[in-house]
């Protein structure tokens, strides 16, 4: 019974931690939502991973920024929120705002994860039915860390053979789906997303068909220009002949 009470207490403490995901190179504001009023001898701190002090403030004094956060951390004088500038992956961790008085009180707690933006994706065709109702596409990332094959019909897309994408980048996902006749490959994590969108008929169109269409248009232009030149030459010759006939009269 005692063990279950401890587990419940730990779960309650964990539930108070707010998860935050932020992109590398951006600024992050960690707010203290409840007013903090420091009394004489009270100490306010923002701790990182339970031990390192990012900022400390004694009642009546000025904030002291630790060496690791000089020039890239600011403490709000109004509400004691912490601003981290140009965050990097090393800044990931648990940040706790605490007031130390007669007893220590946690007034804010965040689990911060700093992530790089995901790379771009590319849709390529593996197989395509003759009537373009079924197409097998490969969706892969630019860095080739994620790759998977999907079979799409006119309504849905499914993983070929039940295989799912191998996710190497932490927190990233690769999804393929149909929307308004287009295949969409979406690569995303908690801070960014990239996608490649192509219509099924464009995916299934063969290169020679596209070049054939282009060649036909090119030939048509040549025909039109040639006919125009012939008409112009005939008109010039006709005028010349008429003038000669007039002179003979």
Image (cartoon, rainbow, N blue to C red):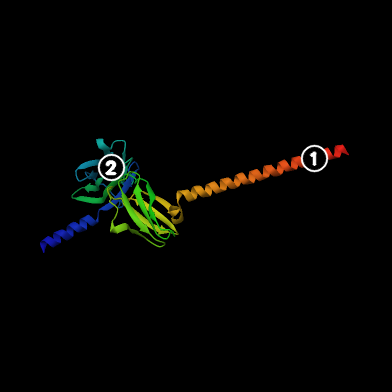
Left or right, 117 with reference to 224: left
Residue furthest toward the left? Answer: 2
The mark found on residue 241 in the picture is 1
Left or right, 221 with reference to 123: right
Regarding mark 2 in the picture, which secondary structure is present there? helix
Q: Earlier in the sequence, mark 2 or mark 1?
A: 2
The mark found on residue 89 in the picture is 2
Quadrant the C terminus occupies: top right
Asked whether residue 201 is in view, the answer is: yes
Q: Position of residue 65 (x, y in %)?
A: 27, 38
Q: Nearer the viewer, residue 82 or 144?
A: 144
Q: Position of residue 217 (x, y in %)?
A: 56, 48
Q: Nearer the viewer, residue 221 or 3?
A: 221
Residue 241 picture quarter: top right
C-alpha gap between disc 2 and disc 1: 86 Å
Quadrant the N terminus occupies: bottom left
Rate crowding at label 2 as few (under 14), some (14 to 19) or many (20 or more) other CA atoms within 10 Å. some
Residue furthest toward the bottom? Answer: 1
């Amino acid at each position: 019974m005692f063990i279950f009470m401890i587990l419940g207490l730990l779960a309650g403490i964990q539930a108070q931690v707010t998860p935050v995901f932020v992109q590398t190179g951006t600024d992050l504001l960690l707010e203290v939502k409840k007013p903090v009023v420091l009394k004489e001898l009270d100490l306010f701190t923002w701790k990182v991973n339970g031990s390192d002090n990012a900022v400390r403030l004694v009642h009546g004094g000025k904030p002291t920024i630790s060496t690791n956060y000089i020039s890239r951390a600011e403490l709000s004088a109004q509400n004691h929120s912490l601003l981290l500038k140009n965050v990097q992956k090393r800044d990931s961790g648990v940040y706790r705002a605490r007031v130390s008085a007669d007893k220590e009180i946690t007034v804010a707690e965040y689990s911060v994860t700093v992530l790089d933006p995901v790379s771009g994706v590319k849709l390529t065709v593996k197989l395509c039915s003759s009537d373009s109702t079924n197409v097998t596409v490969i969706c892969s990332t630019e860095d080739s860390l994620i790759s998977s094959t999907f079979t799409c019909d006119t309504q849905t897309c499914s993983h070929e053979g039940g295989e799912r994408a191998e996710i190497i980048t932490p927190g990233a996902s690769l999804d393929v789906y149909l929307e308004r006749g287009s295949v969409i490959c979406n690569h995303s994590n908690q801070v960014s997303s990239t996608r490649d969108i192509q219509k099924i008929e464009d995916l299934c169109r063969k290169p020679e068909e596209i070049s054939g269409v282009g060649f036909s248009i090119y030939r048509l232009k040549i025909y039109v220009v040639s006919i125009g030149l012939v008409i112009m030459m005939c008109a010039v010759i006709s005028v010349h002949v008429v003038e000669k006939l007039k002179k003979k009269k």
